[in-house]
Amino acid sequence: MALLSAIILLAFTAFGQVPNYLKSYTQAYKKDAHAANLQWFTDAGFGMFIHYGIYSQLAKGEWVQLRDTVPFNEYIKLKDSFHPSGFDADAIVQLAQKAGMKYITITTKHHDGFCLFKTAQTDYNSWDAPAHRDLIGELAKACDQAGLGLFLYYSYAADWHHPYFYSPDAGWNNARPAYDPMPAQYLYKKPEDFRQYVDYVHAQLKELLTQYPTVAGIWFDPVMGFYANPETFPIEETYALIRNISPRALISFKQGANGTEDFMAPERGGGAKVGDKIPIAQKVYELNKDKPKEVCNTMQPHLPGIDGGSTWGYNKSIDGHHLKVEEVRQLLQDARKNGYNLLLNIGPLPDGSVHPEDVETLSNLKDDQ
């Protein structure tokens, strides 16, 4: 009954009431909701990226489970010590607005598989943790009230927790941490097993799109996990599911998976061609290269020799080195000069509060743009 009610609400929102972030595009929305959403995105120019999860407690970035081969049973205990007491959705939205940002993209599930939303598919989530918080729901409400768009990052092509994600033997070393032996929780044995993971993903996408019906789109990652086994992912089916539930929603998958994405989303360099030596990557790049582009960068710069290297989730080793106003201003100038959006990442502290260095920079950015 709850799911049916959510679907009815979504239908009303998608085809009747215009989402608050699209109020200025009302006339275009009435003609073509998807086209209006894409035009809004192209005009938006500047957004906030948020990488936050149980990995933030270790303060070594979002790939720490794989990079440090943190034992599986040890890592999952981070759920019990996850207390996002400093995560304030309203404060985050206000900071984004102060910086001149028009939308926010947040990690709903990163590669470690932990979810920041209420889901019936797994208890490995923030709602079923002692914190009992639906962080995505809180941010969705705050964004809607403030008229900001919200994109939901979802790690489709990597999940180090789900039993049926494919193994490294299937073609990608980063499919699992290099455990020896592999944990008993990992049950993938043959390609057919992967369908159980796909069904899990599809069920969660339905939850995300119905529980938070005003979202602007879905932001998939990591594309290299897809390129390693493209025939394993029913990408057309996945995209159709999203578009059937929310015709307005935009879809991205970094450089692209099949060429039907709404925009490209490379990291750092605007001309980046992820996996450019892989035939499917070359093909998709050609299909998507003239579409709108968003380039993500982060307040935590890449510092050679720093533990964790290039990270998006909080890394204590980079304290004192976060980007300053003039550096962010240069990123914005480059984005505007080259006609793409800048998606600027913050990695909240373990308690979910925004790093003081980032608050200082973003609070003083708008007057310098």
Image (cartoon, rainbow, N blue to C red):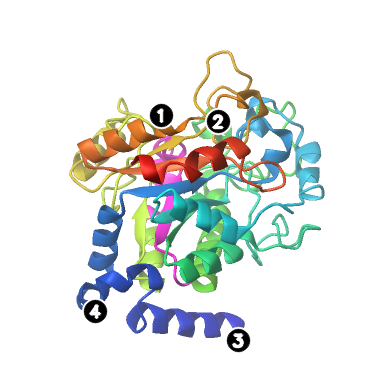
Q: Residue at x 40, y 34 (%)?
A: 328
**If you read the primary sequence from the N terminus, does the residue marked by circle 3 or circle 1 appear first?**
3
Q: Which residue is mark 2?
A: 311
Q: Give the alpha-carbon distance from disc 2 to disc 1, as whole Å.
A: 18 Å
User: Residue 273: x and y, percent?
Assistant: 30, 30
Residue range in magenta is 213-236
Label number found at residue 1: 3
Viewer-nearest residue: 217 or 119:
217
Q: Give the alpha-carbon distance from disc 4 to disc 1, as whole Å.
A: 40 Å
Residue 138 image-quadrant placement:
bottom right
Quarter of the figure with the N terminus:
bottom right
> Looking at the image, do the residues carrying marks 4 and 1 touch, with CB atoms under 8 Å apart?
no
Q: Is residue 41 left or right of residue 72?
A: left
Q: Which residue is mark 1?
A: 327
Label 1 crowd (10 A; few <14 / some 14-19 / many >=20): few
> Looking at the image, do the residues carrying marks 2 and 1 touch, with CB atoms under 8 Å apart?
no
Label number found at residue 224: none
Label number found at residue 30: 4
User: Residue 9: x and y, percent?
Assistant: 47, 83
Quarter of the figure with the C terminus:
top left
Viewer-nearest residue: 131 or 165:
131
Of badges 4 and 3, nearer the viewer stands 4
Q: Residue at x 64, y 57 (%)?
A: 88
Q: Amino acid at mark 1?
A: Glu
- Asked which secondary structure carries label 4, the reply is helix
